[in-house]
């Protein structure tokens, strides 16, 4: 599950194009989907398990995520992104899209899925799609971004696994 997946052609050098980055990482954890979902969507506990972030908050005075709710997250390297929940189906799936973010990203979307497996365990899958800009440079930027985001996603999934094992 840790391999980047091809996406749609989005531009690139003359006569060709490159594919939007789609990648996912998954892990099976020894907790129920309800427990895993609750932990990942509780912004008051987010910093305890998510090594990618140094700040995460829901915007607009809301206390819980849901469709239409926006969040502001800042990565540990200081890059911030505002996202909006486009799907929220406890304890199965959440999905967000970028509404404001770094100039190098034209598009960003993420889906986290929580599927029950045997023995009361959960398969957690973090799946992302992103597209770099400017599009004419995407063929250079996206392979590097794919490597970095994929590594960070793998680290994030493993950190969640460790947090749930405590």
Image: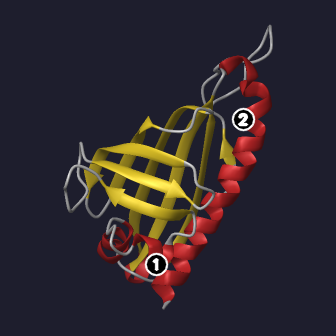
- Establish if 117 lies above or below 59: below
Q: Position of residue 95 (x, y in %)?
A: 38, 47
Q: Position of residue 86 (x, y in %)?
A: 31, 41
Residue furthest left in the image = 62
Q: Which residue is mark 1?
A: 48
Residue, x 50% and y 55% (percent of image)? 74
In the displayed structure, does residue 27 sit left or right of residue 47?
A: right
Q: Position of residue 23 (x, y in %)?
A: 61, 47
Circle 2: is it few (<14), some (14-19), or many (20+) Cα within 10 Å? many
Numbered disc 1: secondary structure: helix
Q: Position of residue 30 (x, y in %)?
A: 46, 83
- Establish if 91 lies above or below 13: below
Q: In the rendered image, which quarter is residue 63 located in? A: bottom left
Residue, x 60% and y 73% (percent of image)? 158
Residue, x 32% and y 77% (percent of image)? 35
In the displayed structure, does residue 106 sit left or right of residue 63?
A: right
Circle 1: is it few (<14), some (14-19), or many (20+) Cα within 10 Å? few
Residue furthest front in the image = 78
Residue, x 63% and y 57% (percent of image)? 77
Q: For the image shown, how many numbered marks are present on the structure?
A: 2
Q: Give the numbered dot on residue 58.
A: none
- Establish if 143 lies above or below 74: above
Q: Which residue is mark 2?
A: 142
Q: In the rendered image, which quarter is residue 133 located in? A: top right
Judge depth for marks 1 and 2 and give the one in front: 1
- CA distance for labels 1 and 2: 30 Å
Q: In the rendered image, which quarter is residue 43 located in? A: bottom left
Numbered disc 2: secondary structure: helix
If the image is split into quadrants, where does the N terminus sit? Answer: bottom right
User: Of the residues under marks 1 and 2, which one precedes in the sequence?
Assistant: 1
């Amino acid at each position: 599950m840790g391999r980047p997946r091809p996406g749609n052609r989005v531009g690139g050098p003359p006569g060709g194009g490159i594919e939007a980055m789609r990648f996912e990482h998954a892990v099976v954890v020894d907790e129920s989907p309800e427990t895993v979902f609750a932990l990942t969507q509780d912004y008051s506990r987010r910093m305890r398990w998510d090594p990618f972030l140094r700040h995460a908050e829901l915007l607009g005075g809301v206390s819980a995520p849901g469709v239409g709710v926006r969040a502001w997250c800042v990565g540990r390297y200081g890059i911030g992104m505002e996202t909006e929940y486009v799907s929220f189906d406890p304890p199965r799936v959440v999905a967000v899209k970028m509404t404001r973010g770094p100039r190098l990203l034209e598009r960003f979307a993420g889906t986290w899925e929580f599927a029950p497996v045997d023995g009361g365990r959960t398969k957690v899958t973090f799946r992302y799609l992103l597209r770099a800009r400017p599009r004419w440079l995407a063929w250079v930027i996206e392979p590097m971004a794919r490597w970095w985001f994929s590594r960070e996603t793998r680290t994030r999934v493993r950190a969640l696994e460790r947090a749930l094992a405590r």
